[in-house]
Image (cartoon, rainbow, N blue to C red):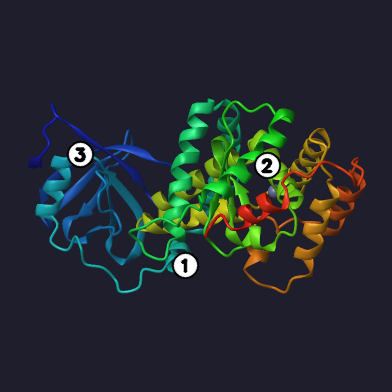
Amino acid sequence: MTLFMDAEMPVFADFMDGDAAVVHRVRVALEDTESGKVVYLHLTEGEPVKWSVRDVRRLRDQAGRDAVTYGLAGEHPARLVVRDASLNAELGRLCPHLDRHNNTPHLMRRLVILSAAAIASVALIVFVLVPKLADQMAVLMPAKGEQALGDATFKQIREALAQNSTTQLKLCDAPEGKAALEKLVARLLPGTDFPYDIRLHVLDHKMVNAFALPGGHIVMFRGLLNEAQSAEEIAGILGHEMGHVEHRDPTRLALRSAGSVGVLGLLLGDFAGGAVVLFLTERLIQAKYSQGAEAASDEYAHALLAKAGLPSSRMGDFFRRLGKKDKDNSLLSHLASHPDPVARIAAADAANTVADDYERVLDDQEWQALKGICN
Ligand SMILES: [Zn+2]
């Protein structure tokens, strides 16, 4: 007897059997059988999959979402994602052990129980298909979409780096410092052609780092300003990040990371929510690009500095000093992640076209104001 869902009002859900990395659209029915109530998942062909209501578990970390993901007792890898509110309510009523969980549902244990074939399929999706799709989307994405993606990720980064979970990391905006920052950007902008405004932010954090986000956001940390010894060094780093923006590297990275994380989250159930945001944030802050992408952004910066009448050798100075520093946070940063730092410094020196009497980008007072932008 069908307890729920008659044929005229079928209810569908997404089902992954845990063996193949394929999402099936299934019709869900709840029926009484001799061995108790059973959830029937009707695939488009073949025998329906049967889940005893006693074995159905609701996966954690899903507060505030309208889709609920279900699994089975004993860490079985199958997943059922239900968006229909009345079906979710019905399952809540009928499944007696919905929220009973093993104590330590570790990510590794979940991965281990996936069969080798499933791991191969997941790897194909996460490492091949998602990146390919993301690269195509990054090219097709309109400027407005990139900006929206950038705005959202910038907010996430500020929240993730804040000491207190209810706040955002402080944006440094002392007026004289901001004016100096704008002067710096204005010196470089004539050599560029972006479909959106460059929005340069300084965040109050000690990491020696700068990185670009989709849609023209460029973020520098206070630690970078502390570490730099001239405004020209900062101009070089800004030029490098503008290169990433121009080449849409952050958009590609954000789409790749978000896509891969989404697929993993679906397959692994409660590996979702906070963990996903942290993973994405970390990827964007570290911004590990290929050697080719880094070299292309350096070349872009050299050309931009030359057009602005600024020396690219100051960029080399900065990376020389960074390379001498001991292992600390800065080595995890995007700026220190270059695959070949020696070649990078040599290239910055070799590209210099400007004589020593160039017009400085900021005077001493402006440079001090920029360094104190967080005060
Ligand atoms: Zn870079």
Q: Nearest to the eye among marks 1 and 2: give it.
A: 2
Assign the N terminus to one quadrant of the image. Answer: top left
Q: Amino acid at mark 2?
A: Leu
Residue in the picture at 68% in, 65% down = 331
Picture coordinates of residue 297 (x, y %)?
74, 42
Residue 226 rendering spot, x and y as whole percentages: 65, 62
Q: Is residue 81 left or right of residue 5?
A: right
Amino acid residing under circle 1: Met
Mark 1 or mark 2: whose residue is earlier in sequence: 1
Q: Farthest residue in the front direction?
A: 365
Residue in the picture at 10% in, 40% down? 4
Q: Label 1 to label 2, Cα distance in Å?
A: 47 Å
Which residue does the numbered mark 1 point to in the structure image?
A: 108
Q: Is residue 339 left or right of residue 150?
A: right
- Residue at 83%, 46% (x, y): give it: 312
Q: Are marks 1 and 2 in contact (CB under 8 Å)?
A: no
Q: Is residue 191 visible?
A: yes
Figure check: 2 above or below 73: above
Nearest the eye: 239 or 84? 239
Residue on which disc 3 sits: 84
> Residues at badges 3 and 2 in contact (C-beta under 8 Å)?
no
